[in-house]
Image: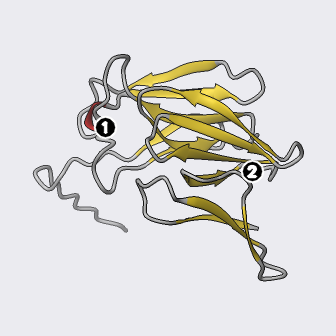
Amino acid sequence: MISFEIGDLGFPHTRLLLLDLHTRQVSALPASEALYFPRWSPDGRYVVASTVDNQKLMLFDFQARKWSELVNGSLVVWPEWSTDSKYVFYIADPPGSSDIDSLVLYSRVDINSQKVERVANLEQTRGLHAGRFGTYYGVTPDGSPLFLRNTGFQEIYALDLDLP
């Protein structure tokens, strides 16, 4: 199965669809209107998705066949699963902010307890801007955060290597 969204991003009429690769049938994920950016859990039991206003992360449980609210904030984006399917990592804004360029908190939520833990504060990290194209946030297999840092073209270095 593959999940994907259809509709214009940012409008409430987006929804999530499922493509069964064996039967080539497309079906709507139930009650997935106004959701986008679906991410399957590695164990295949869940899909996490963002609301189009980026204020919630929603969790679909395929066994229970229902959605539940996983995280609610003024801005939560870029969900990413841990390899054991126990946590969803995401970028969030500091309390009281709603500017996508100010996203600085890298957090994770336990899908069973819904307990949120701050993993990293990126406030002092130059080059990690969530609102820019080319930015990447992820999780390594051991659960460590992984970030792509864009230093721009101002810092170009050369390395000369002489091999035997």
Label located before the other in sequence (1 or 2): 2
**Would residue 11 appear left or right of 65 to someone viewing this image?**
left
Q: Which residue is mark 1?
A: 100
Q: Which circle marks residue 42 in the picture?
A: 2
Can you name the residue that lies furthest to the left here?
154
The amino acid marked with disc number 1 is Ile
Q: Quadrant of residue 144?
A: top right
Within 10 Å of the Cα at label 2, are there few (<14), some (14-19), or many (20+) other Cα atoms? some
- At 78% across and 74% down in the image, what residue appears? 20
Question: Decide: marks 1, 2 in contact (CB < 8 A)?
Answer: no
What kind of element bears circle 2? loop
Within 10 Å of the Cα at label 1, are there few (<14), some (14-19), or many (20+) other Cα atoms? some
Residue 130: x and y in percent read: 33, 42
- At 65% across and 52% down in the image, what residue appears? 32
Residue 39 in view, yes or no: yes
The amino acid marked with disc number 2 is Pro
- At 32% across and 45% down in the image, what residue appears? 149
Q: Quadrant of residue 4?
A: bottom right
What kind of element bears circle 1? helix
